[in-house]
Amino acid sequence: MIPRYSRPEMVALWAPETKFRIWFEIEAHACDAQAALGVIPQANAAAVWKARDVTFDVARIDEIEAVTKHDVIAFLTHLAEHIGADDARFVHQGMTSSDVLDTTLNVQLVRATDLLLAGMDRVLAALKTRAYEHKDTVRIGRSHGIHAEPITMGLTFARFYAEMARGRARLVAARAEVATGAISGAVGTFANIDPSVEEHVCKMLGLTPEPISTQVIPRDRHAMYFAVLGVIASSIENIAIEIRHMQRTEVLEAEEFFSPGQKGSSAMPHKRNPVLSENLTGLARLVRMAVVPALENVALWHERDISHSSVERAIAPDATITLDFALHRLAGLLEKLVIYPANMLANMNKFRGLVMSQRVLLALTQAGVSREDSYRLVQRNAMKVWEKGADFKTELLADPEVTAALSPAEIEEKFDLGYHTKHVDTIFRRVFGA
Amino acid sequence: MIPRYSRPEMVALWAPETKFRIWFEIEAHACDAQAALGVIPQANAAAVWKARDVTFDVARIDEIEAVTKHDVIAFLTHLAEHIGADDARFVHQGMTSSDVLDTTLNVQLVRATDLLLAGMDRVLAALKTRAYEHKDTVRIGRSHGIHAEPITMGLTFARFYAEMARGRARLVAARAEVATGAISGAVGTFANIDPSVEEHVCKMLGLTPEPISTQVIPRDRHAMYFAVLGVIASSIENIAIEIRHMQRTEVLEAEEFFSPGQKGSSAMPHKRNPVLSENLTGLARLVRMAVVPALENVALWHERDISHSSVERAIAPDATITLDFALHRLAGLLEKLVIYPANMLANMNKFRGLVMSQRVLLALTQAGVSREDSYRLVQRNAMKVWEKGADFKTELLADPEVTAALSPAEIEEKFDLGYHTKHVDTIFRRVFGA
Amino acid sequence: MIPRYSRPEMVALWAPETKFRIWFEIEAHACDAQAALGVIPQANAAAVWKARDVTFDVARIDEIEAVTKHDVIAFLTHLAEHIGADDARFVHQGMTSSDVLDTTLNVQLVRATDLLLAGMDRVLAALKTRAYEHKDTVRIGRSHGIHAEPITMGLTFARFYAEMARGRARLVAARAEVATGAISGAVGTFANIDPSVEEHVCKMLGLTPEPISTQVIPRDRHAMYFAVLGVIASSIENIAIEIRHMQRTEVLEAEEFFSPGQKGSSAMPHKRNPVLSENLTGLARLVRMAVVPALENVALWHERDISHSSVERAIAPDATITLDFALHRLAGLLEKLVIYPANMLANMNKFRGLVMSQRVLLALTQAGVSREDSYRLVQRNAMKVWEKGADFKTELLADPEVTAALSPAEIEEKFDLGYHTKHVDTIFRRVFGA
Amino acid sequence: MIPRYSRPEMVALWAPETKFRIWFEIEAHACDAQAALGVIPQANAAAVWKARDVTFDVARIDEIEAVTKHDVIAFLTHLAEHIGADDARFVHQGMTSSDVLDTTLNVQLVRATDLLLAGMDRVLAALKTRAYEHKDTVRIGRSHGIHAEPITMGLTFARFYAEMARGRARLVAARAEVATGAISGAVGTFANIDPSVEEHVCKMLGLTPEPISTQVIPRDRHAMYFAVLGVIASSIENIAIEIRHMQRTEVLEAEEFFSPGQKGSSAMPHKRNPVLSENLTGLARLVRMAVVPALENVALWHERDISHSSVERAIAPDATITLDFALHRLAGLLEKLVIYPANMLANMNKFRGLVMSQRVLLALTQAGVSREDSYRLVQRNAMKVWEKGADFKTELLADPEVTAALSPAEIEEKFDLGYHTKHVDTIFRRVFGA
């Protein structure tokens, strides 16, 4: 976790205090369930909740762990300091450390996902606003980095919206993947604890009981989870790359927002760097790098080995914190992105109408000119544009062979941008609904 | 694609013949839709279907491509050879090559997924059968590779079933991700073709129209698709690793099936190698390696660059063919896997009852012995087992301090395997339903 | 392996015929060494060489393997068909299949590397030629995609040369990593064969004996090898990305070569796509995807498990064939790359001298103007350029406050491109030597 | 960076204090060189060294950065607070931020590598000691997890030594890859600073001048660097997996050291988990995950984009800190690893001599028995071992058909372990030298 690439809400979720708080809730709910079963006294279960409002003392727990060499035991010892050793004596009964640790990890991932979903919603809102704002702002579409045919800036925003909406749906599915808990004992057999305890704890924490666990919750779930984060990160990169291209000096169809007083840009006004988009490109790589180790974590030996643990200590906070930050950075960037419609037009007209050459070619053949002749006519006028900077339409209108086949009005029509944008509304309906 | 790791059905799906067949269907359906719109004559559209039963001549198309340097044009030229140049003249009108290529890729991926789902069903069926067969076959559960508490072999199969069932659900979702088509033109604006053509073609091919495409279908879909294959491959590895462990000489709780006449094993009967499981471990790595390039394919420049194309030419067939083969290899392996219940019992008893020491410890404390004394009692008897190979239960029954607290029957009860298996039915219900 | 992305020389190296040829050489050399030790008769060893010029019949060997289920035995059986069962009877004595297979893999990798080195040499030669050709061709340097200060096209080629030269050195080191052989028996102890056999075979094949092997040659070597291929692929991507940027419509500082008759570009002369560079970007991803599975192959169980084998059957040919093709595609691209110096100048002057604003600022302060005033003077003239399209130098020369501090000649000097290129020769000496 | 998986020496290297210290050194050395060139006054250059012993105040620099929004300017401002604004006025002249940042990154990587080399030396020393200690400790070699032929524990240590020695050599090469510095200005042309400044700064910092840089040092160097860390991590995993296998309950040929008082193991003395080795397996995944993003960092746009920066802020400290910790954890584990030679013998004899069956088979054929008969003789005795637990040698000695061909002494000889260990000294010489 790099502090400069993090938001406090998400960092807090991975703080020791939060972890201990979840541990407490698991233990307390488990005691309730055990009391309901008659396994432990009701009074003891109730007493655990005395610590309901305690902020656990991380330093103190670390101090105890330095002696016990066991994090869960250290926590339980500290818990007993709050609720009294006598009342604490039934806490954790029949449970194994992994019951607490794995269920906690999933609670954290679920909460992290809720933050991520909020970030995606902000991105989606920004994309939708900007899409409608620039629904009809014409710019040149490019394939291979080369001018192709006109599109609108709104279509660009709309396709990113559609992609992010898919990402959101994937994230909702990923949340369900990890929204399970397990209180099933050393090898998952419930030998020492009734399945109803698991059911109660999961219900209270908003989780589903893991249908079958071993000592741990199966890691294919987490592999899927991090893979989804990786895909979303790649979609962020996709948007970032578009903006970086748009901001290139020669293109300059958009710029990241620079506050008027922002230092250093006024002497070299062209030197406004798309540093947020570049940063997002790098952050995407960081989120993605969690995918492979998460996949390697799936195959644990028998009922568990602990190789996954160190990996998750790193990637669970790192990937969620980084993605969360990236989503909000992206949202802010999109909200304020400065669009230059005039430059878009200027770029489109760089080749003075040449992008329309294929429509003219088609029109000539449809007007009865042979394919070979049509090609020759288009080519000789196109070459004047390419080599001498002439205007394509002007040349066509001045070419008797062309005007023999097409009227001036017909030629004009081929240069009508409306031809290219006539289905924008249809596409918007598909993306944003009626 | 490695021939020895492939099944003909899946290989056929990626053959040029299949690809050209799908190209034909897209073009023919598009003609129908264009005719319905009145853009092209009905007769021409109908005539295209003359090639309905043609197996396209790959060598001939290659020959034409060598001249035209364009695969789709080569195909269309060859198609005209079948249906006549005149009837063929409206084929592909208003379309762009990517309309055909991208829609075809998705058709292939969808069909590949159907084969993969069949493979997963075979694996699931095998796992379910073996799970019920060995529901009560007791073996030792292991964490960290070290004996922990008893489980049953059925639980092991059941957890793999649950994992593969999750994988199946993910694959169904992944199928939906790529089950889209696009006939939207050079930059996705439908400038030269009506959206209804896309709708008709997609409907006929079992696809959904891509809500918004550029020149191509967005690649976050394919990234998600290959990520899911990677997760499933990791689940296969998870099962393979379990089997490899079970077949280790010292463990020998299961063996891959060897036909009686299978050569080379009789002089060294112990030398039966789990080569199928080892192979599956490697194949999992091969499938997984598609994940990162698929993620890198998402960020294409503007309305498309073609960097993704070479990647997909490799990973689309390779990953699906390899996973398909792996699923069937796994299914066959599971169907015939030889289980050794007697060895399971022998392994569990390697430490002559020591795995029950924690239950005894708990029982002593519950019987009112102080925790310290309970520990001491358990430890001194455990040490006799560990150091001298004694039997734990026998020692406990002979220890007056122990028998002062626990009756022989109570001691016996602690060694009852039923204690550990009492919730197996519950777990099976969770996994397999009522 | 995708045929269209492969060269026959490299494909041939991975053909079954080549593999069997190497197997033969290993067996024949081993017989010589065994005869020298007196383990087998000299006559038998000599007789093996009767097959020296045989091209082994792959179909026949496959036929035998279908019966024996063992590839090495099938080959040996077929070899006996050539040299006679009696003479063949000592072939392979004391050896294990992996001795042949692993040593062969390394022979193939070494030969593949020699082809790759030739490819890199071709790339390096092209880069050097083009660097000297354009040593003084000025273009704007860009950071963040934004104009910064002038460089020369020669410097761009030179830095790619330096990067590729590093790649070549890495590849030479990688070759040494895998240039080992092992004839050490079932678990690497030489129990059944003298180490001198290994020494002889390795010497004859241009390999070093593996100091300590198990049943296999250790896979950290191959992990390192494929990692180096991945780094070189990334360097190819680096060059490809530069060319793709240069060929963007708005930039157009270079173009991939289009033969005059090349179809489809004349009607839309701007529509020349950098498809080779885009393809190289994708091929780089394909080569890189071998890195992770090669790393996962390192940790084999005990004296070997066979999980690495399927991985290598795919990645060894695929990664080397793809990289080899990419190197030659890149070399051809570079050799013929069309450079547009006039466009470079035009792009540089897009902001009419603004890129020199920092030199002017520095000159003003050095002339005694306060930093604040200098900044104000530069800024007000820069803004005229930015907002009204004025020429920066002209404005400065017309600003009395500026000319009060700097003479016209001094102002002129600040716009001297030679200031930026004065160390080009120094840098070339560093890169290409004296 | 996870605190529990880090060592303070390496963490300190990545602390802000260290970074600022290196920044200072670069600036001060650059001033010296500028003074030598006559570009700035000697007195000012000398004055900078007044801050030689300053520990820079990170909080204060952060405070300034909050205003200036630029880290290098914030540092320079703070530096001026120490040495006086007047003396500080020539600091950084002609340099660009990246000159400082990139050179600093490489200084840190070089120093990190020196720590890593020390870690590898400790691992190598442990492996060598343990190898000689157990040079003749016989254990069964295993392929596919199945018993094959005898080896010695010393050979296992020796092969890990050889692998780690290769890793060390790779790391030395990787150190050279990143041991470069650049003081070359905004786009690497030395427009504003003489190359001799770069040479002086590099010399004083133990670096080589980067032959050709852009705004940044080329990232293929760092890609190679992190790839090497990934390979070394995989070698650590290789050792860790071996130990985890050896410690499995059923194998128990070695155990991680448990101090006598270590809690929790005495009641279940078999429950000693190889948690260090499992942890190393996970840490290897963490180190490896830096490889892919480092490869993705190579292709920067033109003279640099800043996408690499966020990636390196994470992976540079994380990968080096984790690998450093892993090396020392591994070394400690190896130094104290408890080896159980008796269990090794017991495991080897699990099949009562069957591992020798191939030697017997060979001896029979060499004694003139037909291959078919030899096979039959071996098989029928082997089966008695396999099915009834008989002793193989005893059965052979009692089989008249066998003893007709082989004398008891000859049979005895086939069971001589010395046959398998006769070349151990040769191998040791190869690995460790004379």
Image: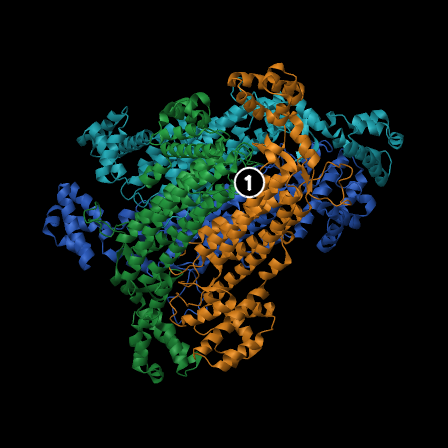
Chain colours: A orange, B green, C cyan, D blue
C49 to A305, vertically: above or below = above
Give the side of residue A21 with respect to residue C424, left or right.
left
Count of numbered circles on the image: 1
Residue at 45% over, 39% down: B200
**Neighbourhood count class around disc 1 (C-alpha, 10 Å): few under 14, some 14–19, many 20 upward:** many
C324 left or right of D104? Answer: left
Q: Residue C368: x and y, percent?
A: 87, 36
Whether residue D187 is visible, yes or no, is: no
Chain on which label 1 sits: B
> Does A32 sit left or right of B331 as displayed?
right
Relative depth, front residue between D92 and C236? C236
Determine which quarter of the picture holds residue C81. Answer: top left
Q: In the image as oriented, which residue stretches furthest toward the top?
A: A400
Mark 1 highlights which residue?
A: B299
Q: Amino acid at mark 1?
A: Ala
Locate the N terminus of chain B and report the quarter of the image it occupies.
top left
Q: Give percent across and percent down for residue C388.
A: 79, 32
Question: What is the quadrant of the C terminus of chain B in the image?
Answer: bottom left
In the rendered image, the vertical position of residue C145 relative to residue C252, given as above or below: below
Residue B25 drawn above or below residue A231: above
Q: Looking at this view, is D330 or B289 the one in front? A: B289
